[in-house]
Amino acid sequence: MKIRTMARFLKGIVGAYSGKVGSVVGSSWRSVDYVKSLPKFTGKKATNGQIAQRSKFALAVAFLSPIKDLLNLGYSDKLQGKATGYNKALQAVLSNGISGVYPSLEIDYSKVVISKGALSNLMGVAWAEINAGELELSWSPEINKFNAFADDSVVLLMYNRTKNFFSIMESGTRLDATLSLPLPASYSGDTLEGWIFTGHRDGVKTSLSYYLGQLVLA
């Protein structure tokens, strides 16, 4: 097992440094300087709790890594602070988005949060396969002058559980009230999970994501 410690580095008279010096390494991230110790190896066997926590972490990372860019967009609201959207989504999944007891762990899709912000989400959202190979998403086009604007973009994230594949669609606006998506013929019979959120034209406002639920295709 490797053990590593880290501390924030306050610049002294000679300033911060970068690189290895003895048993420590200096580095910087987001304009904050840190000092990290080199990893130390220990012969202690990991506890069952540690193994379970590592398994949760690996499961969450494997699920979220393919949509890292979308998560950074989803949490780009200026109220969300400096942490990356990916890290915030990862923390949310680790805290509340994994069900079961090790080794039978699985993602609880209803608890996954892919965006968070002050913008209003869509009202009356529903999705359905209206024809074979055609998915339709609908909502009520309610707007106001505070946090729900006509030209807010609508972002749909769809996860094909059967094929372990993500699809992202961003071609509609709040005022459109509907969004159609053609599906590949190979998706027939597959199980989908979906989330939706809205984004403001200025790029610094997003809404809390909404879980659409599970959809089994014909």
Image (cartoon, rainbow, N blue to C red):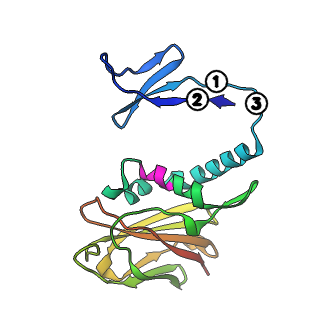
Q: In the displayed image of the protein, which residue is found farthest to the top?
A: 22
The answer to whether residue 125 is above or below residue 63 is: below
Task: Say which residue label 2 marks.
Answer: 4
Secondary structure category for the residue under label 3: loop
- Residue 167 placed where, x, y %? 48, 64
Q: Tell how many labels.
A: 3
Res. 114 mark: none
Q: CA distance from mark 3 to mark 1?
A: 12 Å
Horizontal side, residue 137 vs residue 165: left or right: left
The answer to whether residue 184 is above or below residue 203 is: below
Q: Amino acid at mark 3?
A: Lys
Res. 40 mark: 1
Name the quadrant of the C terminus.
bottom right
Res. 44 mark: 3
Are the two marked residues, 1 and 2, in contact with CB atoms closer than 8 angstroms? yes
Secondary structure category for the residue under label 1: strand
Q: Amino acid at mark 1?
A: Lys
Horizontal side, residue 205 vs residue 51: left or right: left
Between 200 and 26, which is closer to the camera in this rendering? 26
Between 165 and 84, which is closer to the camera in this rendering? 84
The answer to whether residue 154 is above or below residue 203 is: below
Are the two marked residues, 3 and 2, in contact with CB atoms closer than 8 angstroms? no
* Mark positioned earlier in the residue sequence (1 or 2): 2
Between 107 and 17, which is closer to the camera in this rendering? 17
Q: Which residues are magenta?
A: 84-89
- Dot 1 surroundings within 10 Å: few (below 14), some, or many (20 or more)? few
Residue at 44% in and 23% down: 26
Residue at 59% in and 75% down: 214
Residue at 40% in and 69% down: 197
Are the two marked residues, 3 and 1, in contact with CB atoms closer than 8 angstroms? no
Q: CA distance from mark 3 to mark 2?
A: 15 Å
